[in-house]
Each structure stands twice: as structure tokens, then as C-alpha cells.
Image: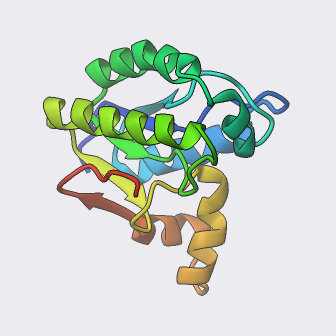
Amino acid sequence: MTERGTLLVVGSNPPSKTSGQRTLARVNQAATILGFDHAVIANIFALPTYRSGGIADLGRTPGGWLDARPPLLSALDECDGVLLAYGTQEPSGAARAHHREQVRWLEEQVEHRDLQTWWVGGAPRHPSRWQRYTWREHPNLSFPEALRHALAQHGECPVMR
């Protein structure tokens, strides 16, 4: 397979209490499977939380969402493909509207750049959920082989509904 340069993995937000090494290892594994030289991560929400549920509290105002856009734009301008991995569950409360707007904005940016886009199992699953998903869908395969089957490219960047 020909190497493709940089895979941008769009995550949810930075971790506050972990190193993120497990996520990084899975991201690099996906990049290798897809034939990219390396991967970078940029997040749709800029503020760190211990769990993604913390976004419901911190994401009630637009600040953390808008602060995430400049790094996303830089990463989109420098990447050769995108893997959506920001999670399948929207935040609750007022943060939900900001999240939906951020995903719509991201969709426009990806489409404008005509970047190939992937996700795991037809949704923007977070890397921490990939093994659970692949084990259910491909129980007789090793994780790397199951992930290879679960990585799906799509023609249009999805909007989370």
C-alpha cells in the first residue's frame, strides 16, 4: 500500500487525568491500517475533562468550541485524510447545540478540502470504544484485523444527529 502522509484523527477533547497513550496507540494503529505515514489528533472541543461527560458542563458556552477551531483548521490544512473519532454520544444540555454546530462546521471544512474521511463501524466512535465495538462485530478476529474490517470510508462527512 502506498503511504499517504498524515491522518488527522478528530477526537472529542484533551484528557485531564491520563496521558492519552492508549488513545494514541489506537490512533497510530488505525493510521498504519489505512496506509498513512503518521497520525495527529485535533479535538472538536478545546477544554480538557476527565470523562467526555464533562463537556456537558464546560461546553455550555461557545468558548471551548471556538478555541478548538484554529488547531482543527491547521490540522485539516496539513493532513491527507481524516478519521472521525469524537464519540457517538452528544453532550447534554446547552452543550448539545454547540456540539452540533461544531460538527456541522467540521463537516463543511472537510468537504471544502475534499478530504477522504473514515470512521469505525459507521460512526465517529472514540478510540477507547473501538475494541468493544470490534469484539462485538468480529468476535473471531484479532483486534487489528477486526479494526481493519471496521474502518469504513464514506463519501460524505456525516453530521451527528
Q: Which sits in the foreground, 23 or 17?
A: 17
Colour convention: rainbow
Quadrant (top left, top right, bottom left, bottom right) of the C terminus = bottom left
Q: Nearer the viewer, residue 50 or 32?
A: 50
Foreground: 153 or 13? 13
Q: Residue furthest right?
A: 17
Percent across and percent down for residue 123 are 43, 61
Residue 142 can be seen in this image: no
Q: Residue at x 78, y 30 (%)?
A: 19
- Residue drawn where x is 61% and y is 81% of the image: 136
**Residue 82 x %, y %:** 34, 40
Question: x and y percent of residue 64 in the render?
Answer: 58, 20
Left or right: residue 94 versus residue 159 is: right
For the point 40% across and 53% down, the residue is: 160
x, y (%) of residue 75? 37, 21
Tally of numbered discs: 0
In screen coordinates, is 142 left or right of 155? Answer: right
Q: Residue at x 63, y 44 (%)?
A: 93
Q: Would residue 43 be seen by someone viewing this image from the given angle?
A: yes
Identify whether 1 is placed above or below 55: below
Q: Quadrant of residue 53?
A: top right
Check the image and report above or below for 1 versus 16. Answer: below
Residue furthest bottom as drawn:
140
| Image: 41 above or below 52 | above
| Above or below: residue 158 compared with residue 58 | below
Image quadrant assignment for residue 138: bottom right
